Image (tube, rainbow, N blue to C red):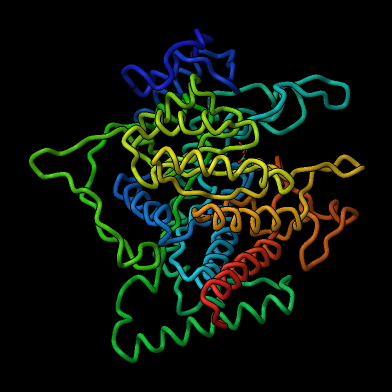
Amino acid sequence: MAAAMDVDAGAGAGAWSPSSWTSKPIKQDVVYDDAEGVKAALEKLQKLPPLVTTQEVNNLKKSLKNVALGKAFVLQGGDCAELFDYCNQDMIEAKVKLLLQMSLVLIWGANKPVVRIARIAGQFAKPRSSPMEIINGVEMPSFRGDNINGFDANPSSRRPDPSRLVSAYFHSAATLNYLRASLSSGLADLHSPLDWGLGHVITPSIREKYTKIVNRVKDALRFMHTVGIDTDRGVETVDVYTSHEGLLLEYEQSLTRLLKNPFPRPSNPFSTPLSAPPLPQPTPSTPQKSYYATSSHFLWIGDRTRQLNGAHIEFFRGLANPIGIKIGPSMTPQELTTLLDIVNPTHEIGKVTLISRYGASKIATYLPAHIAAVQASGHVPVWQCDPMHGNTQSTPAGIKTRHFGDILSELKQALEIHRACGSFLGGMHLELTGEAVTECVGGAGGLTEEGLGERYTTFCDPRLNEKQALELAFLVAGFYRELDETLEGEAI
Ligand code: PEP
Ligand code: CO
């Protein structure tokens, strides 16, 4: 709803406020026909408590700083579009267990702590290539995510409904509540990773590899017990942070609060290496306050809304949270460094995660120049590879899918290109689900295009199913092991 204004207004210049984005041109805007309803919804949101605390956000920021410095790896994943209906025990548990299993495999492979960020508890708004679509001969607004309109293919369900803004908050709150409760009740207890439900669909070879890793972890825990150092709460629980695309700025603004920077508590050893440098501490006599987006720990800007003079960049530049920026082939190296200067003028290490998504056939053309420009600029971001969004294609039957081989290839190339450029890949960003869906083809399960119809349930992009996601984690872990062998000349 921002005014479409002068594109020449100085990007990143001038005073910032949570509403300063409204004076900038905006992409993917939502036009409501119920101004009173919007006002009521936003007023309600402004009164509701934050969904996350500054303490949690700062802990994530500290962990991402370690990722940027090469001391940790970040695994981010979840649905392309989360629906309000996904807010149920089974689906939340399945997704979190899958991320935990994958992170265990990656800890073993990369030999680093893994920071886990789920696309969960708020991934309800989607950018669309066209605002309208024709279904069965009837033209209607495209589905923009549960925060905006309904999926049902009729014009009244597709009408943007402001009461969904408040529903999004409460579905996020319920999801987050169960996530926090189950983690603190031992869902992630490293003493029993086999209870994380590998599922009946897992192939014997993956189960065997996973069991080997689990046995190594168990040996380590037994050793820790023997020498009396297993009392730390770190082996019983882990941190799982939340994230979503910060697309709907009215919603994000209403949940952005001026809050005190808390004194950061040390987090557990599974999310932060022991050698982590301490964050600068605010002195008690001068409590610092910053603007925090409190809808989620981590927000990212999509590839379609990252215009230098645009509303999204304006909003994001004032946030204290760690943020992500998607970068694809249309980003020029110059634009990239200008963007970093705007959203991170103090060059805070790890504040920005650059989420590259070029496609397997394009990454080699674009990534090296982006890395070189960032290196020359002096910024130290987290480099994360999203091997999903540049690899979407349609089958001859018109079904949107992604090939496991392309996903793996983009990840492998990202790892190698970073190494060759004196940089390193800090993490991966995946669209996945804990359900046994049939949306991406390939992988050890051998899903073919003909099999896609069996359980194709995504409301947006095709996701890796649990088997494909875990297999990918093993393969990426294997790349790290191979690279280490090559570097150190020793067998693992
Ligand atoms: C997404 O992550 O779901 C998405 C829309 O990505 P991108 O902005 O990279 O296209
Ligand atoms: Co997507």
Q: Vertically, is 289 above or below 85?
A: above
Q: Is residue 277 left or right of residue 483?
A: left
Q: Residue furthest left?
A: 285
Q: Is residue 260 left or right of residue 140?
A: left
Residue 208: where, in percent of width, then height? 66, 82
Residue shown at 31% from the left, 36% from the top: 346
Q: Nearer the viewer, residue 337 or 15?
A: 337
Residue shown at 43% from the left, 63% from the top: 183
Q: Nearer the viewer, residue 133 or 443?
A: 443
Residue shown at 54% from the left, 24% from the top: 307
Q: Is residue 27 left or right of residue 184?
A: right
Q: Quadrant of residue 389?
A: top right
Residue 385: where, in percent of width, then height? 58, 50
Q: Quadrant of the C terminus?
A: bottom right
Q: Nearer the viewer, residue 216 or 45?
A: 216
Q: Can residue 147 be seen in the rendering of this structure?
A: yes
Residue 229: where, in percent of width, then height? 30, 82
Q: Vertically, is 480 above or below 51?
A: below
